[in-house]
Image (tube, grey):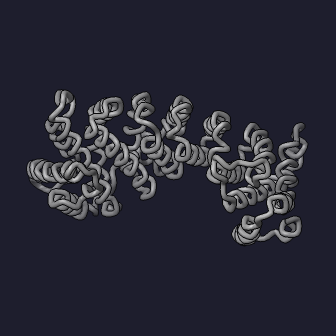
Amino acid sequence: MHALEKRHLPLEDEVEIVSAISAILGSVSNRELQNALLTRLLSSSYEAVKKLIDDDNHSLRQNPALYTQVLNSATRGLHRMGIVFSHLISPLPSEPSSDDPILGLLRIFWPMLEKLFRSEHMENGSLSAAACRALSLAIQSSGQQCMVLLPKILDWLSSNFLSFQSHDCYVRTASVVIEEFGHKEEYAPLFITTFERFTQASSVMGLNSSYICDQEPDLVEAYTNFASIFVRGTRKEVLAASGAILEISFQKAAIWCTAMHRGAALAAMSYLSCFLEIGLSSLLESEGSFSTIAIHVISHSGEGLVSNIVYALLGVSAMSRVHKCATILQQLAAICSLSERTIWKAILGWESLHAWLLAAVQALPVEYLRQGEVETLVPIWLNALGGAASDYLESKSCNGVKSDYGHMQGKGGRVLKRLIREFADGHRNIPNLT
């Protein structure tokens, strides 16, 4: 591997070479030989990272050229470690052994990473991204063996994000943690705290318009992906205890779905749809803990959601958002329809949806609408929403069996999607509002 470093290959070429070597070593059946070969493969990578983290007196920083070289070497080393982790298979929980290669790597990798995450070097975006990627792959490969480290890992990720808020890699790696371990009841408070810290970060709280969102699309995508995994991957009791932070994230995502940046807008819509889907499922299951939170979040945030969905359907980028906008409106209509039959009718029902849609259309500047559109659009859409909601609810409880049939596949859903597509098509020459 020292020879590989000296050749200064492009990262893509190096990834291919290390991947090929790792795949071969991963198939070696003799554990002792496998561990020896892995250690040899990564020895220069360990040295590169140690050279950086052992610089306690900051002497490297006094020589910018040398510091850049050491940073780049450490970044490459972390990339290699991540590649090796990705090619190793975690043993079954019942079969861990002291000579397991993943355990062997973790014994060396973990102390280095611990020191690295606490260092000022993580200010460097490339180094942070490489360290987070290596950590993500280590978590995915080692499985349960990483579980006892979760408190430290999530504390590092959230603390470093607060320190270096342009580095969305910390949020993305936290998503991997939640995806792997979100169902673990004993870590519930830790997951909630992490979500709170990300949400309350000034960089996230400052994303309060589509214009600002367009300046930070990667952060929007990372945060909404984390929020989606949190809602989908943690226990209902955890969601019930996260009501305030879920409401903030829901309201933020409603704003972000109006962004011009396609990836950011669609990621925000995916989170909104995910939240509505889980909320609707809880209502159908009469699952009290989260369904109550979902009703309150939607009742407080529905007007803003509908308004922003309508805005998202204006302008040149609207056609790519038709399906997600239609899905969100169908889910919202289904929840309002279902809520009509419950004790929550007073705070969320069909009248709520009617009022939100009317307010959204009336708030549009006159030049954004055709003559008479205010009077005709609301009743036509409400009628379509009623049919789409019925389709959705029927598909979710057809013969007592849940299905994923509801998204636009029934007649009502198709009519709604057609109306929304026609609206977007008819208003595509209008610039997006910001």
Q: Residue at x 20, y 35 (%)?
A: 339
* Residue drawn at the location 28% of the way across and 63% of the way down: 429
Badge count: 0
- From this viewpoint, is residue 109 visible? no
Q: Position of residue 122 (x, y in %)?
A: 72, 44
Which part of the image, by quadrant, shows the N terminus?
Answer: bottom right
- Residue 194 position, x and y percent, is 55, 34
What residue sits 89% from the left and 37% below the top? 57
**Direction from residue 350 to residue 192 in the image, left or right:** right
In this rendering, position of residue 58 left or right of residue 337: right
Q: In the shown orientation, is residue 215 left or right of residue 250? A: right
**Residue 90 seen in this snapshot:** yes
User: Relative to the observer, which residue lies in front, 116 or 261?
Assistant: 116
Q: Quarter-wise, where is residue 155 in the image? A: top right
Q: Residue at x 86, y 57 (%)?
A: 43
Q: Is residue 217 left or right of residue 151?
A: left
Instruction: In the rendered view, tell whether residue 8 sits above or below residue 372.
Output: below
In the depicted view, which residue is nearer to us: 286 or 261? 286
Residue 90 image point, x, y percent: 66, 54
Asked where in the image residue 153 lies, by quadrant, the reply is top right
Give residue 135's position: percent from left, percent from top. Answer: 67, 49
